[in-house]
């Protein structure tokens, strides 16, 4: 899905994506995007500055809805600066591309995201369910249970928890987690991992201590 209030950009991106064989849904503001997300697109290219609902709020609503939280989101924006980037990625976006957009580079980034998804799907097939004490992570349907209670984790938090819990005792640096979850072709600041870890611990409640901070290195899930 391509979401942008500038008609020329929508037409340019749609044309180039269709040339690569992708089916394209278009929306011209955040509310339209939410309305059309029921079609379950495989990826959403989302402008930041739009009428009705901006990209940040649209992303937030998509990520808190279990029906759409798994859909990768790439922000398209003319704005720059670390604050915007951190906020976008904390909300669960997978990438952040500044305008003017090179269609060739955009298509390359889209393909890279789909490659990472295919790779993650292959890993999940090998170990669909991770069980640690009261924690059960089902990687095939993106659900997490603590005891008998299901707890919702947005996609990025889910993936970080899966990596840590699936490799108990192994220490992961922030860079390792960034590369594993976002990929090496996406520039993400280290603080993004710290924010996600804090949110994961909040949801784990009494089990939060299982995720240990290794000072000066990174994080691990306690054995």
Image: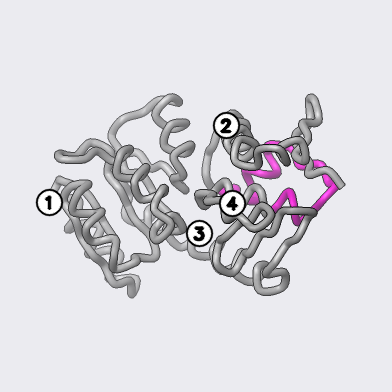
Task: Specify start and end residues of the magenta stretch as a single range.
Answer: 163-184
Who's the residue at 39% across and 53% down the image? 65
For label 2, count other residues whose C-alpha is less than 10 Å away and answer few (under 14), some (14-19) or many (20+).
Answer: few
Which residue is labeled 3 in the image? Answer: 112
Q: As drawn, is 91 to the left or to the right of 182?
A: left
Which residue is outermost to the front? 148
Which residue is labeled 4 in the image? Answer: 158
| Mark 4 vs 3, N-terminal side | 3
Who's the residue at 53% across and 39% down the image? 187
Secondary structure type for disc 3: helix
- Picture quarter containing residue 214? top right
Which residue is labeled 1 in the image? Answer: 7
| Mark 2 vs 3, N-terminal side | 3
Classify 119 as above or below 191: below
Disc assigned to residue 130: none
**Cα gap from disc 1 to disc 3, whole angstroms:** 26 Å
Secondary structure type for disc 1: helix
Which residue is labeled 2 in the image? Answer: 195
For label 4, count other residues whose C-alpha is less than 10 Å away and answer few (under 14), some (14-19) or many (20+).
Answer: many
Which residue is outermost to the left? 7
Q: In which quarter of the image is the N terminus?
A: bottom left
**Cα gap from disc 1 to disc 4, whole angstroms:** 35 Å
Secondary structure type for disc 4: helix
**Cα gap from disc 4 to disc 3, whole angstroms:** 20 Å
| Mark 2 vs 4, N-terminal side | 4
């Amino acid at each position: 899905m391509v979401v942008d209030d500038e008609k020329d950009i929508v037409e340019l991106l749609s044309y180039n994506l269709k040339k690569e064989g992708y089916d394209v849904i278009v929306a011209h503001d955040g509310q339209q995007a939410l309305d059309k997300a029921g079609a379950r697109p495989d990826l959403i290219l989302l402008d930041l500055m739009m009428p009705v609902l901006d990209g940040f709020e649209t992303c937030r609503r998509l990520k808190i809805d279990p029906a759409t939280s798994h859909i990768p989101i790439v922000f398209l924006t003319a704005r720059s600066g670390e604050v915007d980037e951190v906020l976008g990625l904390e909300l669960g976006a997978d990438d952040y591309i500044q305008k003017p957009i090179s269609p060739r580079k955009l298509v390359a980034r889209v393909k890279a995201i789909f490659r990472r998804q295919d790779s993650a799907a292959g890993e999940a097939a090998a170990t669909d369910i991770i069980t640690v004490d009261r924690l059960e992570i089902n990687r095939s349907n993106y659900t997490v249970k603590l005891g008998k209670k299901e707890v919702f984790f947005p996609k990025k938090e889910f993936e970080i928890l899966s990596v840590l819990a699936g490799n108990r005792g192994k220490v992961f640096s922030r860079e390792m987690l960034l590369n594993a979850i976002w990929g090496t072709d996406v520039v993400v600041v280290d603080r993004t991992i710290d924010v996600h870890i804090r949110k994961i611990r909040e949801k784990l409640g009494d089990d939060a201590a299982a995720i240990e901070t290794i000072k000066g290195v990174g994080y691990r899930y306690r054995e």
